[in-house]
Amino acid sequence: QAQLVESGGGLVQAGGSLRLSCATSLRTFNHYNLAWFRQAPGKEREFVAIFRWTGSTSYADSVKGRFTISRDNTKMTVYLQMNTLKPEDTAVYYCAAGLDSKFDYWGQGTQVTVSS
């Protein structure tokens, strides 16, 4: 069973930046689509960004231009650089990995809190 472990969350003021990391134990890391999701209190989990195994990326409209997803295949790690953070970005952030259109593995989540 592969493991995904997020880190890098915390408390930041609006306008600030954070970089999330997700270290994995995926044996064939290069073949996986890697994504970030988030869930705010009282809301459903929502998609944030994806880095496909093909090299293409996509972002939710709400974070486009502010967040950047990247991956290091040698370290089997995916990152989420978050700039110009807003209070509405406050959520638990989860990384996920999957081979097709669904995600088979999830991390435990890391809290991001943006104060106004």
Image (cartoon, rainbow, N blue to C red):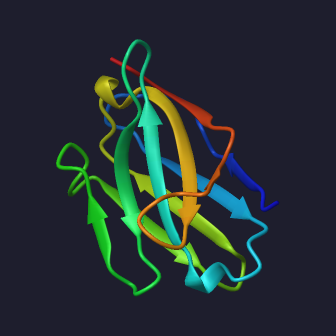
16 sits to left or right of 5: left
Residue situated furthest right in the rendering: 1
26 or 66, which lies in front? 26
Q: Position of residue 10 (x, y in %)?
A: 59, 32
Screen quadrant of the N terminus: bottom right
Which residue is painted at 70% across and 83% down in the image? 28
Which residue is painted at 39% across and 85% down in the image? 55
Residue situated furthest top in the rendering: 42
Q: Position of residue 100 (x, y in %)?
A: 46, 71
18 or 111, which lies in front? 111
Q: Quadrant of residue 44?
A: top left
Q: Position of residue 83 (x, y in %)?
A: 35, 49
Screen quadrant of the C terminus: top left
Which residue is painted at 53% across and 52% down in the image? 19
53 or 66, which lies in front? 53
Note whether 46 is above or below 70 in the view shown: above
